[in-house]
Image: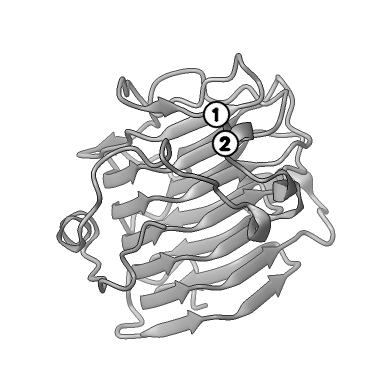
């Protein structure tokens, strides 16, 4: 990491950091933290980001994250199993050109607070945060601490710097499976995240054990509601490595995304081997 609040987007040009086929663990305030890098790839890794000591709960909720990318660009995050105990799993701040595809993100749900799977943040006006794509990921909220007075957003925006609307542009969040096993988590009632422009956030599959929860990202009439308990193995409670989708005929509705689609949406080039759906 470099200077987190002074670095310009992608200042560490041609970083070309690649992490593949590793087991990665952390027990800190952030599990993975990168600032200012241009060129980061994480592929086929096992992540476990825990909080050994929560400490200041408000601070941990507001600023902690299992993976935090600040002022970065050209991020490729593919086929990783990711178990996070932070209030936010993926934090993208003033970041551009990023692809998250075919990952499993598993939230342990240990905070009595409003939490999120993905948080887009604008603070130091380095942005805008733009050209971010999430495709074919599985997001899983374990049964835990969130109650009816809080919410869980699979996609959340946060303007901590008081910036103007539209700071988050060209955000694509499509064909993801978003599941909650928390009976008390109400989810986001309606509408879409604030501050988005030129963005597509549907269709996705949502399901919650709480039948009254609505994990809506917008007005997506073609989104599917899938009964997760019929499609996920019973061992899913142990973590993302055992979160195995069975069948799959009803999952990830929509056309197959092509490499050209991804390049246009995110600016990221992928190979045929990386573009898999099984």
Q: Residue at x 71, y 53 (%)?
A: 85
Q: Residue at x 50, y 26 (%)?
A: 215
Would you place residue 224 above or below residue 20 in this image? above
Residue 209 shows in this picture: yes
Q: Badge 2, how many Cα within 10 Å: few under 14, some, many 20+?
A: many
Q: Do labels 2 and 1 touch, CB within 8 Å? A: yes
Which residue matches tag 2? 179
> In the rendering, at what x and y percent does residue 55 appear?
83, 53
| Disc 1, SS | strand
Q: Residue at x 51, y 54 (%)?
A: 91
Would you place residue 10 above or below residue 137 in this image? below
Answer left or right for 274 relative to 259.
right
Name the residue nearer the viewer: 238 or 248. Answer: 248
- Residue 207's tag is 1
How many angstroms separate mark 2 from mark 1 (CA)?
5 Å
Name the residue nearer the viewer: 253 or 18. Answer: 253
Q: Residue at x 65, y 75 (%)?
A: 24
């Amino acid at each position: 990491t470099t200077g987190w609040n002074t670095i310009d987007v992608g200042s560490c040009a041609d970083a070309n950091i690649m992490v593949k086929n590793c087991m990665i663990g952390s027990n800190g305030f952030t599990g993975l933290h990168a600032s200012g890098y241009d060129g980061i790839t994480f592929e086929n890794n096992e992540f476990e980001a825990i909080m050994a000591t929560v400490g200041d709960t408000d601070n941990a909720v507001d600023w902690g994250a299992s993976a935090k990318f600040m002022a970065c660009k050209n991020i490729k995050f593919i086929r990783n199993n990711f178990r996070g105990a932070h209030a936010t799993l993926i934090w993208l701040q003033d970041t551009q050109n990023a692809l998250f595809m075919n990952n499993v993100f598993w939230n342990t749900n240990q905070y009595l607070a409003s939490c999120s799977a993905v948080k887009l943040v604008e603070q130091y006006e380095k942005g805008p945060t733009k050209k971010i794509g999430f495709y074919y990921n599985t997001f899983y909220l374990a049964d835990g601490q969130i109650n009816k007075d809080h919410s869980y957003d699979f996609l959340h925006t946060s303007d901590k710097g008081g910036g103007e609307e539209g700071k988050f542009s060209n955000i694509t969040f499509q064909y993801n499976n978003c599941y909650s096993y928390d009976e008390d988590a109400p989810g986001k009632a309606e509408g879409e995240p604030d501050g988005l422009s030129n963005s597509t956030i549907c269709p996705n599959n949502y399901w919650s054990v709480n039948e009254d929860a609505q994990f809506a990202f917008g007005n997506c009439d073609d989104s599917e509601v899938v009964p997760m308990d019929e499609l996920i193995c019973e061992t899913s409670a142990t973590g993302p490595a055992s979160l195995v989708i069975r069948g799959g005929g009803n999952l990830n509705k929509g056309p197959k995304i092509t490499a050209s689609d991804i390049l246009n949406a995110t600016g990221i080039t992928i190979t045929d081997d990386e573009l898999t759906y099984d």
